[in-house]
Amino acid sequence: MREVAILGVAMTRFGISEKTNLEMFAEVGIEAIQKSNLAPKDMGALFFGNCLGAFEEGQLHMAPFAHSELGLPVSAPATRFESACATATVAIRHAALLVAAGVYDIVIAGGTERAAKMGTPLATRTFAMASQAQHESNAGITFPGVFAMAAHMYADKYKVDLSVLKMGMAEVAVKNHYHGAMNPKAHFQKEINVDTVLGSMMVADPLQLFDCCPFSDGAAAVVIAEANKAKDLVEKPIFVAGMGQASCGPLYLQRDITRVRAREESIHQAYTQAGIGPDEVDVAELHDCFTIAEILAIESFGFYEFGKGYDAASRGETRLGGKVVVNPSGGLKAKGHPIGATGAAQVTEIVEQLRGESGARQVEGARVGLVDTLGGDLGTVCNIILRS
Amino acid sequence: MREVAILGVAMTRFGISEKTNLEMFAEVGIEAIQKSNLAPKDMGALFFGNCLGAFEEGQLHMAPFAHSELGLPVSAPATRFESACATATVAIRHAALLVAAGVYDIVIAGGTERAAKMGTPLATRTFAMASQAQHESNAGITFPGVFAMAAHMYADKYKVDLSVLKMGMAEVAVKNHYHGAMNPKAHFQKEINVDTVLGSMMVADPLQLFDCCPFSDGAAAVVIAEANKAKDLVEKPIFVAGMGQASCGPLYLQRDITRVRAREESIHQAYTQAGIGPDEVDVAELHDCFTIAEILAIESFGFYEFGKGYDAASRGETRLGGKVVVNPSGGLKAKGHPIGATGAAQVTEIVEQLRGESGARQVEGARVGLVDTLGGDLGTVCNIILRS
């Protein structure tokens, strides 16, 4: 397998958009190609992510239309991936694997989603379709409910007082809004404090409104090439050091939802391939769909022992300047979460961080970055480790 | 890249099922694994196809649940593909590429769909979501309409009297029903004659009801492995000789819909990789969603010159015993068309034909077989050439 690198990256501002999925993707796709000093004709294939286009726009088979919006050649196949919130990460992983294999030399990958415009009730219902429909979503489970259960189980299992856990969770939201306030592409560019979180509407006890990421519109794309080609094309190619992807079935088969089995397997694959461990990671973009989810993730990565990650944000250790900066983009919480685009935006942030292009929210000296995206109610996890 | 082979294959009977997508897929997945003399724990990954699960069952993120129904290990990622009607073919192609690359040694791929139970009006509407939503499906275009236009353009371009073309199309339906009557897995196992077609309800002039494939429920799965491993496991592995996939954007960008640009590119890729031409193909399972579509396909493959394929079925040349047998399974027309499963069922038929296991509809001496699946209104084509 050949070494693979990322060249140009681009994302729309996340938030509420009047544009279609295809319009948003065309914008970022062209920008990523241009930043790679390439033209559409140079792309060998398109790996395209979208989850809810059929519901949002009556548009199921979007990949070949994204392909023509970008002006790609007929010989470059366009393939759609859907892995719930991990959609774009899985698309990028497959793109990188096929470049590593020599099937393609240069490809483009990413995703697009409109989730804000459909409104909270319909978005909640359609997002819940990522749960097991026959046994879970039909019974009324939604994602806030799943992660609320995880928070209660965490407090119980590790004997952490729920009010202490809630404070740790609130500090995750405060940190990610602090980071997001420095990100001109973020959905929310406004700092909050612990009172903002604890004073907000209850969504699913113990999760309050500011424990939850928003529904956002947006798109992101990255160009991927064989490493030597990448070095010829751009000044600072960012190398794919390791990747992982794993699946662990529906929620009702999980014995302990404070431990995401798919993540533990996926990160093991990625660390092994990269030949590194958690201590070598300088910056991570991880799946903070809810504040508790960030706490579960940093424990799975080995940044903290299980049961010990709940006050990492309170202690400032995951904040800019801390020992491992988590979600400098603002994360799903503040940057926003257009589900089919999220993984590509995480990769975009890590690439820019490793290039030293992140302005006020730059993680000083970042050399190794980790991308983590969780799909569904723990069913799918995909990880990508990048290095400068 | 390593040589790749297909081991066990399985499909449900196509038709109307009371089972869920996951139940159907679990059935065929387990059968394909057993026929490969393997166990679920041996699978390195799942490449899963489905198009309309979110509409049919409120089930978006089905791949990890299919994974757990099969009892696959957590380390084997489950990835969903959607390429409209070419969904399962594209999933199988990616599976074969990653086995060829050495990323996995043994994987399972396939698809499942429930399209019959939703009824014709909703099925027609949801299928039309595979057209470009903003410019085409919102204007009322449906797939019968697209292929009706292609038939009119074909008659006009090649100066074939429409009544002559209609007779050639009717003979495609008669042939495929003749084949389907010998296939115990087919949706329709009943012979028809030309009068059945020409006397049937008009759907979209000149396409009548018997020019159109049905909406079907069904699932199909195949196990794929590195060739040497495959030889150790099964008596008759069937080898992947060449593959192709191409994209050509929405209908409104096509200059001539009697020529499917994505197919011409895709089949070129597949022939080139296989090192063969049309004369070496003994049997083809191709995308006869409408009778005219079969005529367009055999011309793109080079079985016939452009404008000369319309009476191939009338002359018996594509029928069992003819020079190249087309759709011995009954094709989409008679075997049925559960869209996310169709490509895997085509591969299943070709594998069984090349193994000499097709009973009454066996193509004598078949050594090389071609799979062809068209996604959307000409947007995506994927081809796989198999050899014994």
Image (tube, coloured by chain):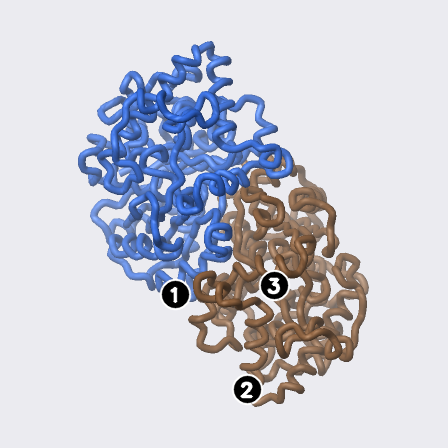
Chain colours: A blue, B brown
Q: Amino acid at mark 1?
A: Pro
Give coordinates of residue A246: x percent, y percent: 50, 35
Q: Which badge, 2 or 3, comes first in the chain's sequence?
A: 2
How far apart, in angstroms, are the residues tagged by discs 3 and 1?
A: 23 Å
- In the picture, measured across the screen, residue A328 lies left or right of residue A381, that is left
Looking at the picture, do discs 3 and 1 lie on one chain? Answer: no
Query: Mark 2 or mark 3, which is nearer to you?
Result: 2
- In the picture, measured across the screen, residue B156 lies left or right of residue A43, that is right
Give coordinates of residue B226: x percent, y percent: 57, 48
Disc assigned to residue B156? 2
How far apart, in angstroms, are the residues tagged by discs 2 and 3?
A: 29 Å
Which chain is indicated by disc 1? Answer: A
Give coordinates of residue A14: x percent, y percent: 32, 43
Answer above or below: position of A317 versus A87.
Answer: above
Residue that mark 3 sits on: B371
Q: Residues within 10 Å of mark 1 (few under 14, many from 20)?
A: some
Q: Secondary structure at mark 1?
A: loop
Q: Which corner quadrant of the image does residue B38 belong to?
A: top right
Query: Mark 2 or mark 1, which is nearer to you?
Result: 2
In percent of the image, x 71 and y 81: which residue is there? Answer: B314
Q: Amino acid at mark 2?
A: Asp
Q: Residues within 10 Å of mark 3 (few under 14, many from 20)?
A: many
Q: Which corner quadrant of the image does residue B187 belong to?
A: bottom right
Circles 2 and 1: CB atoms closer than 8 Å: no
How far apart, in angstroms, are the residues tagged by discs 2 and 1?
A: 29 Å
Answer above or below: position of B102 versus A272.
Answer: below
Circles 3 and 1: CB atoms closer than 8 Å: no
Disc assigned to residue A73? 1
Q: Secondary structure at mark 2?
A: helix
